[in-house]
Image: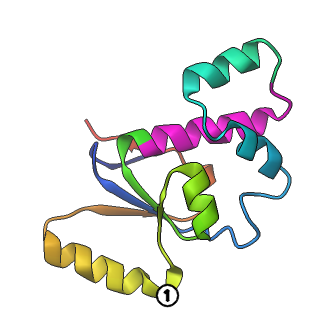
Amino acid sequence: MACTKKGGEIILLSTCNEGIGRTHEQGIESLAGFDDDMIKLMLKRNRVKDRFAAASCMYYNHTRKNFRTSLITDLLTCNLLGFFYLNEKNLAGYLERRLKMNQNIKIGIINNSTEVLPVLIS
C-alpha cells in the first residue's frame, strides 16, 4: 500500500487496548529490539519460536525506518516498538496542530494496521 513519501507520517489506529496481541506478545517483546538482519539470522538458525512475532517486528522496523509513526495505544507499547505515543482523546487536536505547522502535510491513517504494509511512493 503506497501511503506517503519517505519521512512522511503514519498514524496507526489499531488501539491495541489488550496489548500487542496476547497470542504473540512474548515473541514480539523478545524480538522488538532487533533489526531485520538479526531477526533473519535468528530465524535461519531456528532461534525464533514465534515466526508471526518475527514478521511483526520486521513490519514495525520497516514502518519506523521509513515514516514518523504514531500509535494509539499505551505508552509502554509505543516505547517497546519505537513508535510515537498518541492518545486517542487528543487525535483531533494533534491533527490540527500538525496542519498548523504545515498546511501541505500528508498524513496517512491506517486502520487494522498490522494487516497493511505501507510502502514508499516513488
For this view, does 101 lie left or right of residue 6? left
The residue sitting at 83% across, 17% down in the picture is 46
Across and down, in percent, residue 115 comes to: 62, 51
- Check the image and tell me how it is coloured: rainbow
For this view, does 117 lie left or right of residue 4? right
Across and down, in percent, residue 53 comes to: 74, 40
Overall secondary structure of the magenta section: helix
Across and down, in percent, residue 56 comes to: 66, 42
The residue sitting at 54% across, 70% down in the picture is 72
Determine which quarter of the picture holds residue 95: bottom left
* The C terminus: image quadrant: top left
Q: Is residue 114 above or below residue 61?
A: below
Determine which quarter of the picture holds residue 91: bottom left
For this view, does 68 lie left or right of residue 85? left
The residue sitting at 59% across, 35% down in the picture is 58
Indicate the secondary structure of the residue bearing disc 1. helix
Q: Is residue 92 above or below residue 75?
A: below
Q: Nearer the viewer, residue 11 or 29?
A: 29
Of all residues shown, which one is farthest toward the top?
45
Q: Is residue 67 above or below residue 84?
A: above
For this view, does 96 lie left or right of residue 22? left
Please report the bounds of the magenta region as a residue range: 48-64
Q: Residues within 10 Å of mark 1 (few under 14, many from 20)?
A: few
Residue 4 is inside the magenta segment = no
Amino acid, disc 1: Lys
> Across the whole image, how many numbered discs are drawn on residues?
1
Q: Which residue in the protein does label 1 denote?
A: 89
